[in-house]
Amino acid sequence: AVACRKIYLKNMAATTIQANWKASVCRKTYLKNLTAAKLIQSYWRAAGCRDAYLRTVAVATMIQTNWRASICRKAYLKNVAAAKMVQASWRASVDRKTFLKGLAAAKLIQAYLRAAGCRNAYLKSVAAAKMIQQKWRASVCRNRYHKHIAAAKMMQSYCRVAICRKTYLKNLAAAKLIQASWRAAICRDAYLRTVNAATMIQTSWRASICRNSYLKHVAAGRLIQASWRASMCRGAYLTTVNAAKTIQSNWRASVCRNTYHKHLAAAKLIQSAWSSAVCRKMYVKNIAAAKVIQGYWKVALCRDEYLKNLAAVKLIQSIWRGVVCREIYRRHVAAAKLIQDSWRASMSREAYMKNVAAAKMIQAKWRASTCRSTYYKHVAAVQMIQPIWRGAVCRKLYLKHVTAAKLIQSSWKAAVGREKEVKNITAVRLVQANWRAVVCRRMYLKSIAAAKIIQLNWRASLCRNTYHNHLAAAKLIQAKWRSFYLKNVVAALIIQSWWRAAMKRRPQPDPLLWKYIGGEEVAEGIILSVYTISMVTSMFFLS
């Protein structure tokens, strides 16, 4: 009995040693498996984070390329508009210089023609004076001869002188009447010219007032249009931002939901596999604790990533709003400069027209004064010649008066014709100035209408491009989401097939091995742990 008891104690000691050894071996194996599982999970999460980071980098790169392309497009269109405006200004300056050269040439030709007319009139007057002097000298000689020869005809001469004096007085009264009529006509023409100049100044002033009022209304309309377009763009931008936020929230919810379902399925699978063993229970508890810690860790990582993405989105939004406000400010500055240039051009044009009108008035006054001085010189010459000719023959005096009357009539007709020509030239120039103003106004209105059409087309194309970019981004996100979803489904199907095959393929342990190891539950747990490790390792290498 003592020997049997010793043998029994030895067997119990060996059994205790074996049990402790097996427990230490199971513990070491469990720790190795736990370390391997954690390593596999860390690699799997690192791969997921790397994929998410690469997707974020790709999307940010695509947004940056589109943004830079839009900036380059805007800069190119601004340069094209500036070049067109410079070309238009250059062409206008070339046309203005050509017009001024033509006007100067016309004035030069008119001056030469007038100088030639005055020179011809002066030469005619000199020839007439020489002819009068010749006649006068011949008459003096003839009178001396008649005084020596015809002393008997003195009484007849006295009678004829009396008759001639009366005729001369009548002709003198008629000449004075003609002179008074001529001066009255000159005063009347000067008065009418003054009235016409005053009327033209009033019309120009009223036209400038109407033009200023029209430009103010146009500026107000453009300001209202700019404000309305800015509000429309802001509304479209806010709608796009809200849509992007909605898509982001749905995407994050779907990712969290899928992650939750995956974790729930894995937990159910592990609980169903380890429900019959104590080691399985301990493993499930440790796994549950590790999953809770991992869940908190993942939530913290997701929160950090979400905050980073939110900060990046806010930064992009602030940059975009700054660019939009800067662009609106530049447009307003360009519009203000264009309005200022138009206003200065209109003021310069009005000053130029005033100077032209003043020059024309001065030229008319100068010509009138020249004609008047010439006329007074002729009158003085006639009045100086008249007392010399009073003692001449009445017939010759009468003929000379008739010739002088014809000369005065021809001069009067020439003056009237010249005045009519000056009036016609003034009217033609006024009509030309009005026609040029109408043409310039029409061209300005056409350019404004064309600029508005170009602006509308450009804004429509910009909105269309933005819409297509957003649509392409949404389609890209949908395609990435579908591919990711399909990859997850395929991975889940592969895991399920591997697990079913492993459950079908696992061998049945030998009863002797059960007794040697220490029980059926321990043997089943070891087999399940070995198959689980092999399955996880194969999944890692497959991914």
Image (spheres, helix red, strand yellow):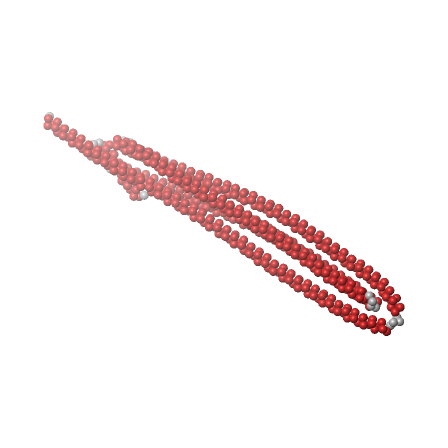
Q: Please count the marks in the image.
A: 0
Q: In the figure, 281 relative to 122: above or below?
A: above
User: Can you see residue 514?
Assistant: no
* Image quadrant in which the C terminus is located: top left
Seen from the viewer's position, the closer of residues 132 and 305 is 132
Q: In the figure, 60 relative to 378: above or below?
A: above
Q: In the figure, 7 relative to 109: above or below?
A: above
Seen from the viewer's position, the closer of residues 89 and 19 is 89
Residue plotted at (83% across, 71% down): 143
Percent position of residue 284, x then y: 29, 33
Percent position of residue 235, x then y: 50, 41
Q: In the figure, 205 relative to 405: above or below?
A: above
| Residue found at the far top of this picture | 1
Q: Is residue 462 left or right of residue 531?
A: right
* Image quadrant in which the N terminus is located: top left
User: Can you see residue 36?
Assistant: yes
Seen from the viewer's position, the closer of residues 123 and 157 is 157
Percent position of residue 17, x then y: 17, 32
